[in-house]
Image (spheres, rainbow, N blue to C red):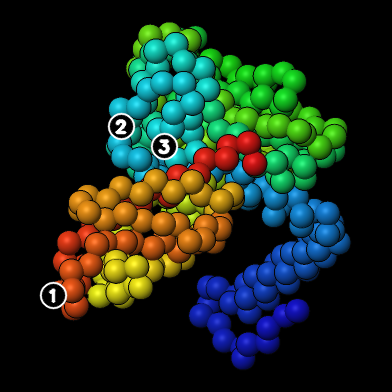
């Protein structure tokens, strides 16, 4: 390709030759790019696309330690939870609490899990994910910060053995610890673990577990709304203000039936913990599924108060607790 330009000459520069040379170079570059693009397109197979897609799926819930439905802590005691989906798996006096961190310092999120003392914090990955892992390499990792060397590390338990990363160096800075393991057959169990073996202060955030083999594993974040939905499938606290006149039943008592539909379908049927802060009111659970429940509130009726409004006196705190960490 060349460009014909009307002849002109300033006595010093041959512009026609220069333009033709430049466009010849551009033509060669375009041809080379077209060949490279054809090579790339030919190399992208459905399997390659699946690998790329899977590399962006983080199977850890609340890996950025953003969701704390139980409050900021402190939390302690075997099997108790701190940040959503993370529980104390081994208790040697470890205490959990929420910490706010600097984006520029952490590289990952706004919040972190702060631990003091010795123990293991774990999250058990859902069984349906374990069943899907086969003939692949799984990588896991996360950001850790502590001032003491050789006390803090990450790991996974595959149902038989623990696979650990190296320890944090004790630099006092955020370090990304990671490792990998091969999965030949579907796993019966998979737990992500945060281990601290010294009575020291440590911070944890940006946890990832992916079912592919990228050259460099980084934290794979999720949208906050997605994280909340996934966490609320296991645990949710709701404060419900019950309102309405109710009805006078044939037994002489005033009753109010209320149905609560969950925003997120629960993994299992929830065990309801109903706290009624107004006296002289009882309740019956009429139905209870993993999608919602119907509850009936009962109060002795006063014939002189036929228009009695339960909303004026009734404040119900309902804890929708459901942590089937084994599912």
Q: Residues within 10 Å of mark 1 (few under 14, many from 20)?
A: few
In the image, is 122 to the left or to the right of 40?
left
| Cβ atoms at labels 2 and 1 below 8 Å apart | no
In the image, is 233 to the left or to the right of 138?
left
Q: Tell me the CA gap for discs 3 and 2.
A: 9 Å
Looking at the rendered structure, which numbered label has been put on residue 304?
1
Up-down: is 268 above or below 79?
A: below
**Residue 109 visible in this rendered orientation of the protein:** no
Looking at the rendered structure, which numbered label has been put on residue 83?
3
Is tag 2's residue or tag 1's residue first in the polypeptide sequence?
Answer: 2
Depth check, mark 3 against mark 1: the one in front is 1
User: Residue lying furthest front in this view?
Assistant: 251
Measuring 38% from the left and 67% from the top, which residue is drawn there? 258
Is tag 3's residue or tag 1's residue first in the polypeptide sequence?
Answer: 3
Query: Where in the figure is residue 137, as x and y percent of width and height?
Result: 76, 35
User: Residue lying furthest bottom in this view?
Assistant: 6
In the image, is 137 to the left or to the right of 198?
right
Measuring 62% from the left and 91% from the top, which residue is drawn there? 6
Name the residue nearer the viewer: 27 or 164: 164
SS of the residue under disc 3: loop
**Residue 46 visible in this rendered orientation of the protein:** yes
Which residue has dot 2 on it? 73
Q: Tell me the CA gap for discs 2 and 1.
A: 48 Å
């Amino acid at each position: 390709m060349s460009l014909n330009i009307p002849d002109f000459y300033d006595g010093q520069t041959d512009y026609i030759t220069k333009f033709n040379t430049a466009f010849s170079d551009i033509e060669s570059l375009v041809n080379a790019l077209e060949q490279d693009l054809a090579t790339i397109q030919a190399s992208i197979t459905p399997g390659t696309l699946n690998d790329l897609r899977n590399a962006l799926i983080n199977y850890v819930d609340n890996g950025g330690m953003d969701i704390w439905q139980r409050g900021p802590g402190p939390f302690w005691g075997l099997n108790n939870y701190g940040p959503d989906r993370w529980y104390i798996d081994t208790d040697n006096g470890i205490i959990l609490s929420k910490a706010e961190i600097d984006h520029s310092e952490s590289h990952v999120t706004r919040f972190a899990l702060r631990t003091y003392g010795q123990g293991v914090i774990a999250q058990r990955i859902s069984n349906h994910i374990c069943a899907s892992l086969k003939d692949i390499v799984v990588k896991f990792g996360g950001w850790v910060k502590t001032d003491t060397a050789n006390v803090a590390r990450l790991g996974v338990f595959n149902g038989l053995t623990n696979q650990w990363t190296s320890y944090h160096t004790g630099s006092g800075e955020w370090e990304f610890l990671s490792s990998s393991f091969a999965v030949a057959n579907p796993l019966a169990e998979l737990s992500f673990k945060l281990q601290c073996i010294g009575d020291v202060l440590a911070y944890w955030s940006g946890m990832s577990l992916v079912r592919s083999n990228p050259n460099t594993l980084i934290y794979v974040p999720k949208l906050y709304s997605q994280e909340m939905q996934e966490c609320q499938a296991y645990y949710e606290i709701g404060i419900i203000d019950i309102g309405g006149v109710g009805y006078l039943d044939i037994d002489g008592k005033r009753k109010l039936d209320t149905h609560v539909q969950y925003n997120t379908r629960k993994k299992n049927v929830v065990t309801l913990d109903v706290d009624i802060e107004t006296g002289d009111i009882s309740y019956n659970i009429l139905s209870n599924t993993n999608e919602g429940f119907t509850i009936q509130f009962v109060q002795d009726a006063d014939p002189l108060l036929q228009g009695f409004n339960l909303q004026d006196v009734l404040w119900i705190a309902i804890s929708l607790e459901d942590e089937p960490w084994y599912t």
